[in-house]
Amino acid sequence: MNPPLSSGELAHALTMAGLEVEAMEAVAPLFTHVVVGEVLAVSPHPNADRLNICRVDGGQGEALQIVCGAPNVRPGIKAPCALVGATLPGMTIKPAKLRGVESYGMLCSAKEIGVAAEGAGLLLLAEDAPVGMDIRAYLALDDQSFTLKLTPNRSDCLSVAGVAREVAAITDCAIALPEIAPSGAEIDDQRRVVIKAPSDCPRYCGRVIRGINAAAETPRWMAQRLERSGLRCVHPLVDITNYVMLELGQPLHAFDLDRLDGDVTVRFARPGEPLVLLNERTVALEDDMLVIADDRGAQALAGMMGGVHSAVTGATRDIFLESAFFNPSAIIGKSRRLGMSSDSAYRFERGVDFALARNALERATRLVSEICGGRVGPVTEVTGELPPRNPIVLRRERASKVIGVEFSAEQVSALLARLRFQVEERNGAHHVIPPSYRFDLAIEEDLIEELVRLYGYDNVPALLPQGKEQLSPRTESARPVHEIRSFMIMQDYQEIVSYSFVEAEWEADFAANLQPIRLQNPIAAHLAVMRSTLLGGLVDTLRFNLNRSQERVRLFEIGRCFLPGKDISQPLRVAGLAYGAARPEQWGEAKREVDFYDVKGDVEALFWPDSPRFKAANHPAFHPGQCASVMLDDTIVGWIGVLHPRWRQKYDLMTGPVVGFELELAPLLQRTPPHCHEVSKFPPVRRDLAVVVDEKVNLQNMLDVMLDNLPDVVSDLTLFDVYRGKGIDSDKKSLAFRVMMQDTRKTLNDEEIDAAMARLVDVLSDRIGAELRN
């Protein structure tokens, strides 16, 4: 398969098809004039112990004299040879004299030509490497390396074969996957396999291979491909299993057969059962972890990592080669719990093709035979109930409507066939069975997404939606959230958006919540609980601003809180915080610090036209003497107060008072519609009412009493003065009210005015114990 696209065009096509190409780079940096060189002779340098004088055939017609200090230089080897004039990363090769000896070129290590991070000696090439051939061509260094950022549902593309299938479908090219022919059994040796967890391991394949060559080496072509995929060469058997995993997407594992006792058993671990993993870490297994075991105990963590005891080594002669399908639910989360990761776990957690295990085993067997030799035994396969492949019904009309492009039945069938789907058209619909490796497809919408991916998002016309405009009904009593937000901004507050998960300490301090809702997997250790108050985020943001020399800060946030209980409730709230000067600095008004009543005024204006009541109360976040509950219709809907001195000191906010509030949002979204009243043509009358009451009498109680018994002619009642001092007992205070009276039908006479005032005095006297001030 060779699609008619450049590397850049292919990267764009993959990205637009949902396989995002995160990076594309050459496998080696740019360099020139480096060829395959053969060392003909080596002699010691007369003036340096660690240098040698080499005669090198670089295919230029005559041998070159090159001074080399590599420890592995010797006659007969072949290595990269940089000719005079060559440009390497960070240097240019020129004729040079080293300790008195002329040198015309340089023999190179892997590091010097940029194909490896380290290089202790020369990069040795194969004996059949053609002398004089450009090293970039010989080592295929002009290849491009693509880094794909796959979404979790596309684990079928975690292999070269998977990406090749996608490229073939996207470009409508033929695909040439490696032919996998079954290996005939040369011996009868088998190892019995017992599955004790059939739902979590519905397919397990394995075979015995005896008499492998322990001295075999990984072929250069395989080592090169593994290294360019980010894997280092370990041992030919391990390299083969890694290669098949990268090629086909099926993780495999090779056990040293001589280290297995009895049957191979797939079961769940016993609580506390020990296992030393290949990374030499000893773990205590839990009873929900699937293992591969023998008669002595666990030998591998299924789908994650093998154990040291049964691992292949340089002395291994006989192996048991495993290829299995593990249910993702049995693997997911286990490696994270153990604090480890592996390529196998990464794939099995997302899902592996359940039909691939046998073919992958045959592919690995063929490679083992070619590279390591050995005699192959028959395949032992245990199969349970595999995931069903139910047909998905795709309606062409539905797909055309969702995508915005009219498709014919033939187009739909052709596009799905490029994805190797089984498609049958009947009853006006397409009945589609995806291949076993596309287990992410289950519903009609999944197939519609596949259609538009192949059709090309760039080919979908950008059409504006058409429809009839219709205004939704909206009552005056309903108040949208954006009006709350706009009002707060007009009051000089700035909106913040903070995390819903916060520090547990904030919950204890600002909400006295010692048992908050905890996160199972927090994004950070300190952000481990869900908030039940917005105040923590506001205080933290205030501190952030003060640390950056902000002198006046007014913040608000609208967000959800999370209250623990049988069913977690998630009320929306609005909260605010004010610090610094009450008003921006100006010439026309003296500077003063914000206080409780400034913020109380903002809250009252926020509720307008409704009138909330404020009642002295205690809240864990606020000063016990400067805190009030906010009530509407005798229901507490929020809190307001000055931040508690303990929290001001703890959070470094001692430079000035901090006043805050937190309100339920739901009552603010419903308001009493304003009512129209006739404008009186008759003059208003003002009378002042000054009474003396006990110091402990609450103003709100006095207002409630008067408003409940308000004469019809009184249009407004407002407190305008509070006096303590000369002429008033020390345990008393004087409150003066402005009483406005007006009638819409006539001018009030003295008798009516006096009667209204007398009624107010009587009510205050009877209910509050107030005395008229002389």
Image: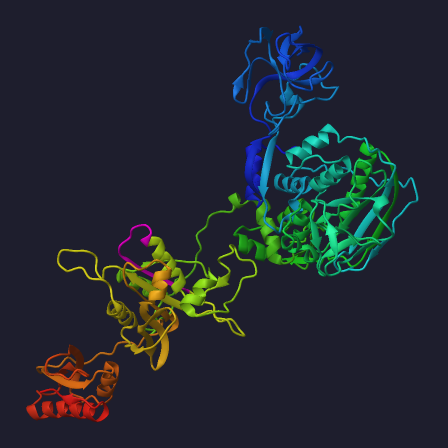
Asked whether 126 falls inside the magenta stretch, the response is no
The C terminus lies in which quarter of the figure? bottom left
Instruction: Choose between 492 and 145: the one closer to the eye.
Output: 492
Residue 72 visible in the snapshot? yes
Q: Is residue 558 left or right of residue 366?
A: left
Camera-side residue of 580 and 197: 580
Q: Is residue 263 above or below residue 117?
A: below
**Res. 311 image quadrant:** top right
Q: Quadrant of residue 761?
A: bottom left
> The magenta stretch spans which residues?
546-559
Residue under the point 68% across and 53% down: 439
Q: Residue 747's x, y, as percent?
A: 8, 87
Residue 549 is inside the magenta segment? yes
Q: Is residue 530 above or below residue 721?
A: above
Residue 419 position, x and y percent, is 66, 46
Residue in the picture at 56% in, 35% down: 24
* Image height of 97 relative to 309, above or below: above
Provide residue 351's location: percent of width, then percent of height. Answer: 68, 52
Q: How is the image coloured?
A: rainbow
In the picture, measured across the screen, residue 147 lies left or right of residue 355, that is left
Task: Specify the quadrant that holds the N terminus.
Answer: top right
